[in-house]
Amino acid sequence: MKRTGIICSLLVMSIIAGCGKSAADAGTVSTETEAVIESSAAVEDNNSDEVESVEENNAEEIESEEASTTPENTDINEAEETDEVTETDEATETSEAAESTAILKDLSADYFTFGVGINGSTLENQTLNIPEYMELSKQQFNSCTMTNLMKSCYILDQMGSQANLKEGNEEPALSFFSIDPTLEWCQENGMKMRGHTLVWHTQAPEWFFREGYTDDGEYVDKDTMLMRMESYIKQLLTHVQEEYPGVIYCWDVVNEAVDPESAAPDSPFKCRTKIGPDPNPWYETIGQDYVEMAFTYARKYADKDVKLFYNDYNTYQAPKTTGIYNLCESLKEKDLIDGIGMQGYWGIDYPPMSDIERAIRRFSELGLEIQITELSVGVDTENDEMFHKQADKYSEIFKLLCDMDTQGGGPANITNVTVFGLVDHYRQGDTTNSRLFDENYNPKPAFNAIVEVLESRS
């Protein structure tokens, strides 16, 4: 499964082109930065609905500008940046400093696995190409998540799908070049992966839902779209399970389908019908059944030991907590789900820890696994004072998670916590400052705060 750099360079442009035509049609791939989420904290305190609208477009784009970087600039800048990172004495020194720190995955072992985001929006700018990043990830974590490159717009092949039709095959064509290098690294380094994500209304190419796999065709009927969904899930799961057996231990099967603001009136789980002003193409073509059918197909084709999750943001907001609970309760009754993923796009001052605790307690009543899938607490200003406040928030979060976990005497079976990145400013243009290590790979106060909490529980 080796892929040369030349092949990757030739394919990266077509991958980006495929992602450029997403379900929201303009801006889903180039969504705004995580800084927008963090700066909206004050707004959320006064109007949670407004913040939910902001986070809807931002929750998956923790990489700051990474998904909006043009291929031309990305290819040049990232190649130069990688050379600088790997060759400077400073990077070597800081990497050695990091090696002497406590090990998160060991400290959390009695409670949950500890995961990290593998950032990047192209084959060339992904952190897989930064040796220091991957070595530190391997040292500190035993789970990872691809933050972008496993989404459908990177995997679906429009030209191949149209060629299939000409040959009488109505199934979509898939390409796995965006995910194979990271899966191969995981296989070689004993790293497990959360599969992220199978069905999501954002970063799903619009042509996938239309007649002839064309950009301007009419939406296909329900039966056709169900066939396409099943084929996509079958092909993707078959590929990763045959080529990289045991690497992916769980999937975010459906992402962010609960939306009280745009909910279908007859939906018991408040099924999303809109992406901002635009229709949710999964709902338009299939209806609210798209969620259950995605889990049905995932259960059909996933290996028996692979867990299936529903994943969402703002899970602590009461209307959304109720919708997610109702959805997952129905899926559990049909033996289609194993866990709930709670994204952690939280700020220093929000949400109240009591709201997070309430949501975890409610979800724990279902007896499903709970995972914190995209933990990210940023700061508005990068100075010592704010980074210590950031550390205090991370400390509060991990104290709560340990208390809520069954190992700590709580009601919840928390099986994984994933921070959605490793180092701040990992490449030129990245403005994210929510991570546990600084740009020189030195542990931040947040890292030390988490270590202190976990050491106190061991």
Image (cartoon, grey):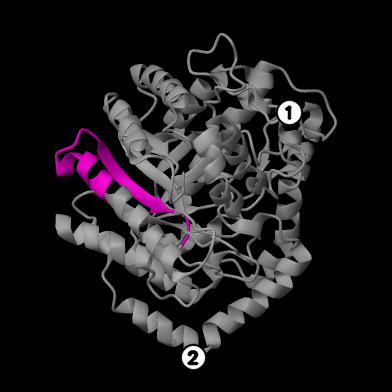
- Residue 129 placement: quadrant: bottom right
Which dot marks residue 230? none
Asked if the stretch drawn in magenta spans residue 417, the answer is: yes
Instruction: Count residues near mark 2 (Cα–Cα under 10 Å), then give few for <14, some for 14-19, many for 20+.
Output: few
Q: Is residue 232 visible?
A: no
Residue 72 seen from this side: yes
Q: How far apart are the two marked residues, 2 and 1, measured between alpha carbons?
A: 50 Å
The local secondary structure at tag 2 comes to helix
Q: Which residue is mark 1?
A: 277
Amino acid of disc 1? Pro
Q: Quadrant of the C terminus?
A: bottom left
Q: Residue at x 53, y 82 (%)?
A: 86
Q: Nearer the viewer, residue 444 or 363?
A: 444
For the view shown, which residue lies furthest in the top direction?
266
147 or 269: nearer the viewer? 269
Residue that label 2 marks:
89
Q: Which residue is situated farthest in the bottom direction here?
A: 89
Q: Quadrant of residue 102?
A: bottom left
Q: Position of residue 213 (x, y in %)?
A: 77, 33
In the displayed structure, 427 sits above or below 35; it is below
User: Quick check: 153 above or below 340?
Assistant: below
Contact (CB < 8 A) between labels 2 and 1? no
416 relative to 221 in the view: left or right: left
The three-letter code of the residue at mark 2 reads: Asp
* In this picture, residue 227 sits left or right of residue 451: right
* Magenta residue span: 399-421
- Residue drawn at x 49%, y 56% is 378
Residue 404 magenta: yes
Indicate which label's residue lies in the foreground, 2 or 1: 1
The image shows residue 442, relative to residue 38, as above or below, that is below
Residue 439 x/y as whole percent: 50, 73
